[in-house]
Image (spheres, coloured by chain):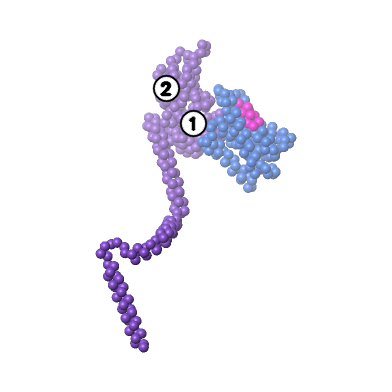
């Protein structure tokens, strides 16, 4: 119960930080995607069944506060979650370095998936250029956020989330 | 025998008093210079008196300083708090002045719009870096609906796209999916202002033979029924006409300070009204 409440609080904090606090202090492309970081953490540490739904929900929450297309990030997050969980047994999930690398790979995958979906299903001319231009700063910001997460006590705890 | 002793004492005391009186009367100064006795005594005491005076002065100063120091720490803390409070008041006064200027400009724009408007504050930005939307602090409970235009003191900001009871999301004119029917004020050339991301827009579907120059003012044309006619959008910063193609490439810098938007006006007018 307390863990769930803490997780909910962390989620709300991440959304508020990302929408209202960080934009005031961080240049646009350097905004980290905290929900993506949370999703990767979930994929490496959480159970698959509940985790998949939670990953989809995290993406949906991101969609509520981003762009026009509800379900875009939800879909991308779910796909990335399933890919990571399918190989997570082969990985040393407690490793901080691996977590940062996985978040970086997930960022690339998320941007690619979003771009493909946008180009296939919507008319958004010029989005490729914007995404390509913002990719490297976004990647760096996410890797930095992931490295900070590895310093949290919750990361070093051997317990499974949820 | 006893009586002699008493008389002797009286005589001795009287003599002493008389001598003292005579000594005193002799020393009533006719001139104010010190006599030999005074000088002698002063010479004896002078070497002792000077250090004694210094030591006494030191202790007096120390005592005074100690008295002054009592409560200085508390006073220091109080003054520091006062300085902090005053600094905060200066900052908030400066902020109020800036906000006042911004709101004054916004009020000026409000006066020029012939429709009812609602002043809103920006409370959040888009979660991702490539979409350009902002969250405002008013929603359907304040009469806001999807499609309503949003303007700032300097010009067009965008359009309401998602509405919740207490908040709404505004699609900024710099977003890739935004499109606003526009006119070049000078030549009346028409086109559609589309977002390019990165804080810029482009005027699209303006044919090569239309007269567009750098520095031209771009305003809303009113076509489409979303925006009222004549609201400033931005300024033409680049015009490119290739050898081939029907249209020219026109880049526009929006007037509204999108990156640091804090307040805006929602025009409470449904599109196509």
Judged left or right of residue B155, residue A43 is right
**Residue hosting label 1:** B259
The quadrant where residue B118 appears = top left
**Residue A112 lies in the magenta stretch:** yes
Query: Which residue lies at the image location 72% right of the left edge and 35% below the top edge?
Result: A91
In this rendered view, identify the residue nearer to me: B39 or A28: B39
The quadrant where residue B270 appears = top left
Q: Chain of mark 1?
A: B
Judge whether B93 appears above or below A120 on screen. below
Query: Which residue lies at the image location 27% right of the left edge and 67% below the top edge?
Result: B28
Dot 2: element: strand
Q: Where is residue B119 drawn, in percent x and y?
A: 43, 36
Judged left or right of residue B81, residue A130 is right
Q: Which residues are magenta?
A: A104-115
Q: Which chain is purple?
A: B
**Colour seen for chain A:** blue
In this rendered view, identify the residue nearer to me: B56 or B216: B56
Crowd band around label 1 with a 10 angstrom C-alpha radius: few (<14), some (14–19), many (20+): some
Query: Which residue lies at the image location 51% right of the left edge and 13% below the top edge?
Result: B242
**Residue hosting label 2:** B217
Dot 1: element: helix
Q: Earlier in the sequence, mark 2 or mark 1?
A: 2
Judge whether B231 appears above or below B79 on screen. above
């Amino acid at each position: 119960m307390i863990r769930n409440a803490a997780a909910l609080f962390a989620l709300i904090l991440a959304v508020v930080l990302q929408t209202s606090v960080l934009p005031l202090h961080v240049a646009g492309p350097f905004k980290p995607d905290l929900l993506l970081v949370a999703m990767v953490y979930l994929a490496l540490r959480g159970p698959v069944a509940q985790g998949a739904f939670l990953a989809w929900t995290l993406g949906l929450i991101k969609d509520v506060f981003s762009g026009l297309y509800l379900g875009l990030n939800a879909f991308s997050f779910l796909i990335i979650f399933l890919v990571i969980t399918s190989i997570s047994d082969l990985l040393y999930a407690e490793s901080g370095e691996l977590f940062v690398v996985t978040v970086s790979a997930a960022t690339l995958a998320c941007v690619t998936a979003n771009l493909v979906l946008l180009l296939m299903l919507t008319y958004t001319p010029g989005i490729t250029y914007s995404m390509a231009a913002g990719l490297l700063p976004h990647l760096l910001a996410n890797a930095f956020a992931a490295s900070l997460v590895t310093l949290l006590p919750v990361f070093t705890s051997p317990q499974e989330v949820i | 025998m006893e009586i002699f002793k008493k008389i002797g004492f009286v005589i001795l005391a009287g003599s002493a008093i008389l001598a003292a009186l005579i000594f005193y009367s002799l020393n009533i100064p006719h001139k104010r210079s010190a006599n030999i006795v005074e000088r002698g005594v002063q010479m004896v005491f002078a070497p002792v008196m000077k250090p004694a005076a210094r030591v006494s002065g030191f202790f007096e100063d120390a005592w005074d300083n100690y008295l002054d120091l009592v409560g200085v720490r508390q006073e220091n803390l109080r003054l520091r708090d006062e300085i902090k409070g005053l600094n905060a008041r200066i900052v908030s006064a400066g902020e109020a002045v800036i906000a006042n200027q911004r709101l004054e400009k916004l009020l000026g724009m409000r006066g020029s719009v012939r429709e009812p408007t609602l002043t809103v504050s920006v409370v959040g930005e888009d979660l991702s870096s490539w979409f350009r939307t902002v969250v405002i602090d008013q929603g359907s409970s304040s009469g806001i609906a999807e499609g309503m235009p949003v303007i700032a003191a300097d010009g067009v900001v965008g359009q309401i796209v998602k509405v919740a009871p207490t908040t709404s999301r505004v699609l900024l004119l710099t977003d890739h999916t935004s499109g606003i029917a526009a006119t070049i004020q000078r030549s009346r050339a028409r086109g559609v202002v589309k977002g390019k991301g990165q804080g810029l827009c482009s005027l699209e579907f303006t044919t090569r033979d239309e007269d567009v120059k750098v520095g031209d003012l771009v305003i809303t044309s009113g076509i489409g029924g979303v925006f009222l006619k004549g609201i400033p959008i931005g300024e033409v910063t680049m015009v490119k006409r290739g050898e081939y193609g029907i249209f020219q490439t026109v880049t526009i810098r929006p007037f509204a300070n999108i990156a640091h938007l804090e307040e805006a006006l929602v025009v409470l007018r449904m599109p196509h009204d």
